[in-house]
Amino acid sequence: MLSRRLLLISTASLATLACPAAALAQAKPPANDPAALLTALYAKAAKDNAGGDFVNAPKSRAKYLSKAFAALWTKAEAKTPKGDVGPIDFDPVSNSQDPDIKSFAIKVETQDDSSATLAVALIGSQPRSKPNDSVIRYDFVRDGGHWRIDDIRGAVDGEPWSIRKLLADSLKS
């Protein structure tokens, strides 16, 4: 009888210890990877019919952008005369002035331990005149142990653009 009682107490104790660990394992945030970051960004953009909040909200840049990319953006904006439009006068997440994202598809083009390039194909209510205008590429780097965007690239009327290049060019003038 004593051995059965000891067995029941031991089992109950182990179950109590195991439950919090299982609950913590389930409560862990999703894996820190570029596709998860872009999925969250685009799900919010499609839901709110808005673009990237980091474009006009410098405080949210740390969540998405590498430290170097965020610093370049902040420096370029600081150089903009008061009342003028900043160096980025469109929403790069939607590649437009007026975001219209109905759905999206994310594809990993390259990825290693320190960098990655992902392409996001956008579908809006109106098709774009040039197919390349519907694809936004994100270059990622590992920054402080997290994946962060280090450049955003796309095309307008088939002509390529890069946010990093636009920001760097704005500092030259």
Image (tube, rainbow, N blue to C red):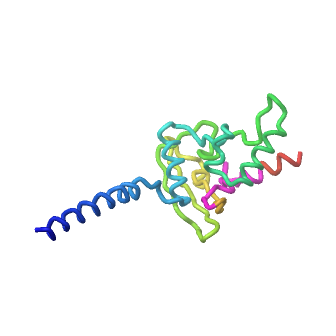
Name the foreground residue: 10 vs 87: 10
Q: Main secondary structure of the magenta part?
A: strand
Q: Residue furthest left?
A: 1
**Where is residue 95 shown, x and y percent of the image?**
62, 46
Say which quadrant the C terminus sits in. top right
Point out the residue furthest to the top here.
83
The image shows residue 70 at horizontal and vertical percentages of 72, 49
- Residue at the image position 33 percent from the left and 60 percent from the top: 17
Is residue 146 rendered magenta in the image? yes
Query: 13 left or right of 111?
Result: left
Task: Give percent across and percent down for residue 161.
Answer: 71, 52
Residue positioned 64% across, 62% down in the render: 142
Query: Residue at image x 53%, y 50%?
Result: 122
Q: Nearer the viewer, residue 52 or 130?
A: 52
Q: Is residue 55 left or right of residue 171?
A: left
Residue 10 magenta-highlighted = no
In percent of the image, x 19 and y 68: which residue is there?
A: 7
Quarter of the rendering containing residue 16 = bottom left
Position of residue 154 measured from the top left corner of the image (x, y, whole percent)? 65, 53
Quarter of the rendering occupied by the N terminus: bottom left
Which residue appears farthest toward the front when viewing the image?
2
Tell which residue pokes out farthest to the right in this image.
Answer: 173
Closest to the observer, 68 or 51: 68
Q: Is residue 39 left or right of residue 164?
A: left
Q: Which residues are magenta?
A: 145-166
The number of callouts visible is 0
